Amino acid sequence: MSGDQPQPDAPDQTGTAALKTLSLEELSQIEVTTPSKEPVKAFRTPAAIYVITGEDIRRSGATCIPEALRLAPGVEVARIDSSTWSIGIRGFGTNLTRSVLVLIDGRTVYTPLFDGTYWDVQDTMMEDIDRIEVIRGPGGTIWGPNAVNGVINVITKSAKETKGALVSAGGGNFEQGFLNARYGGGNGDGFNYRIYGKGFDRGPEYHQDGQNYDDSWRAAQGGFRIDWQRDNQDTFTLQGDLYDEEAGESVAATSYTPPYSQTINGNASLSGENLMARWERIVNDGNEIHLQAYWDRTDREEANFAEVRNTFDLDFLQRVRLPFRQQLSWGLGARVDPVDDTEVVSGLQFLPLKRTDYLFTAFVQDEIGLVDGRLSLIVGTKLLRTNFTGIAPEPSVRLLWTPSEKQTIWAAFTHALRTPSDSEQDFYLLGYSQTLPNGMPYFARFNPNPHFAPEQLNGSELGYRRLFGQKLYVDFAGYYNHYHDLFSEDITGPPSVQDNPPPPYLLLPAQFQNGLDGYTKGVEIAPEWRPAGFCRLRGSYSYLHMDVYAQPNPTVYFPLPTGPTITGSSPQHQVSVQSAFDLSKKLQLDLTYRYVSALPALAVPAYSTGDARVGWRFSRQFELSLVGQNLFQPWHLEYGPPPAVGIVRNVYARLTWSR
Amino acid sequence: MEQVTRSAFRRWACLMMGFGLGLPWSCKAADEATEYQVKAAFLLNFTKFIEWPAAAFAAPDSPIAICILGDDPFGGALDQMVAGEVVNRRKVAAQRIKRAPPPKSCQVLFAGGSEKDLSKILPGLGPGVLSVGEGETFLRDGGMIAFVVENRRVRFEINRTAADNAGIKLSSRLLSVAKSVE
């Protein structure tokens, strides 16, 4: 046997010996685990990537994408209430998180309204998710603007992989009822399709102040995907989704007229649809063309503002192999968002109400094999232009060294940008302070800042992955990120009496500016151990240190000290241990423990909690599972500010039928 | 019975480790199957339901060679599967090849889903080679048996014309288990 031929694994006769004795008919009925090919690719990626597979999601019991993200190391998932989350990577998590770019099947769901992701409307059939790739660290060169601290890439299965019927239904104390159904088919000649529909009703979380605003959440969603593979090279995909939901919320509303400030408890009415067409030509490994176009409409009607946004996007990407072991990638992108806002309360205004946001990008990246395919240098840059900024680059340099099949060492130096948004450049936000003795109201107002510049990051990263034997795998990543021109809240002048709009009021003027600098440093360690085919243990530890401070700037009248609020809103330590056991062919047990350290700025104490799932496949077509989440306490806090909503213990049962 | 008890105990030991209890037992009793273990079992099974023309073999005692073209997705499962197996008085052997095989060297050719240019390779295989591949396009490229994974189960489709043309007889049992026969 020559050296380059793969050696058989250590003998594992039990599994194969059992299969040998089975008949053709019996073999056709065996359920198989299909390991995703992606982890192999991920092993050789010069970035801190973690792949959550569809099977991981199924076994975690997660019922929505944000909850599934708890499986990835280094991701800070904090549930705020029933329908909102703060999801940050390496710090800076907020209810929208400006620094993490989120895509679903290549469709950017990050909105330039407030810059960030509305997690309440990012959903799909969980059973149809092939994988979620989580990239910690800047990814601007490939993924584009706002991939500053990380990228979350949700990828659904191709229609070929979802043939047949599947229905799952269930409910519990918090997941009050859900129904998911999908049917997929094809003509056996490269044409495949699926359609799905789902709905859920989630209850309110625990409100410790007793002011039970009803944050329950109801949604219905449907969609389809068609894949048509012509010859071996070309694949055409058409897919779309349609949703309509209602999410209870409690929002502040300020107005220039009495009562000046009030809290409105009501329902956000959220709907939208999207349609995407994609053509992929894969000539061979390394020679590919991708072209995609999509339209995405979102309609948010909240108790204090409303927006309808239509996004039209076109993206082209080509990868070519060049001589001297070079792999060249280049691409172009264009996105145009016509926006139509409605003023609901006078203290929250986007002006003009009708605007058009746009983004144009171009990128080129070259991967150069240096030493015998063991060392690669990857250099590239993105150039981007938005309606808010001039042309700006996002360059990166990465080094990948694979000293053996079982080890990867990588380093990266990256520059990434968070582009300005409507909320910095077109936004008036009024806050009520008090009514003066003469009866005049006193407000502070953030006025638009047409000079708001991109937030900038210079990131340095180092990573190491190692496979010890066949069973133990360890992924280690460390980083030092230096930020400048971060978002700040600054008072721009002394209070003065204004009379537009009437009646007269005292106004303290403020603006969102680029007044903060800072750095983060940290490490993430994620071991995985598979002592046997039926037993898998995974763990992760993430350490984060943040420091954010005001730039010395004499022109600012008075900077609000927001630095400590930012640094105190991300956990310094996170620990997670997940275990997956197959107790028998029919019975599965999954246990998760997680610890998140305190968020001092939000008065959220450290917490430990655990999840458990028991899955029982009692017949070939049916599986019954029982899931408990946040089991250690009746409720706990994950995010603030006070009075924060308590995240409740959630127990539900699910019956899945597939054929 | 003792086998069953021991297996259950190992499971339990393994479970306790999840809570930091118990010692690192060697818990090794995998009875769950991966996709490629099942595909390897099918490949071995196919040889029992197929009649090759005598001219397919170099000699009367030549083994039935199952050749993996290009990338090997089995990770050793096929080697374990065929080890010590004898079918119709012939040994079964697994081999790895980089390009189209010379005549009489391979009786089963397996081409993984990542192989390209199969529409050029498959018609040139000559008689007496059973071609097995993955995905629906494999049959259109001239292959004989294609594995498809459906609802987490491995099934296969058959192109009977291609097999007939190569002088390979497929048993009725094989045809009846197939998901579809063209």
Image (tube, rainbow, N blue to C red):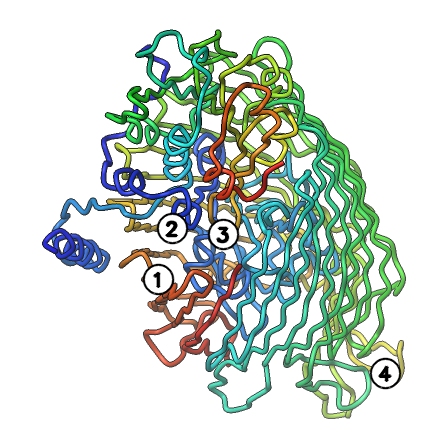
Tell me, for residue A542, which label it has, or none.
2
Q: CA distance from mark 4 to mark 1?
A: 53 Å
Which is nearer the N-term, disc 4 or disc 1? 4
Tell me, for residue A54, which label it has, or none.
3
Q: Identify which amino acid the numbered label 3 is placed on.
A: Gly
Q: Identify which amino acid the numbered label 1 is placed on.
A: Arg
Comparing marks 4 and 1, which lies closer to the viewer? 1
Q: Secondary structure at mark 2?
A: strand
Give the total number of marks visible in the rendering.
4
Q: Identify which amino acid the numbered label 2 is placed on.
A: Ser
Position in image of residue A324 (x %, y %): 58, 9
Q: Which residue is mark 4?
A: A504
Q: Do the residues under discs 4 and 2 have CB atoms within 8 angstroms?
A: no
Q: CA distance from mark 2 to mark 1?
A: 12 Å
Q: Do the residues under discs 4 and 3 have CB atoms within 8 angstroms?
A: no
Q: Which residue is mark 1?
A: A594
Position in image of residue A202 (x %, y %): 56, 78
Which is nearer the N-term, disc 2 or disc 1? 2
Q: Residue at x 51, y 12 (%)?
A: B99
Q: Do the residues under discs 1 and 3 have CB atoms within 8 angstroms?
A: no
Left or right, residue A350 beside residue A369: right
Q: Secondary structure at mark 4?
A: loop
Q: CA distance from mark 3 to mark 2?
A: 23 Å
Q: CA distance from mark 4 to mark 3?
A: 58 Å
Q: CA distance from mark 1 to mark 3?
A: 21 Å
Position in image of residue A619 (x %, y %): 40, 64
Q: CA distance from mark 4 to mark 2?
A: 52 Å
Q: Is residue A551 visible?
A: no
- Whether labels 4 and 2 belong to a single chain: the reply is yes
Q: Chain of mark 4?
A: A
Q: Is residue A160 visible?
A: yes
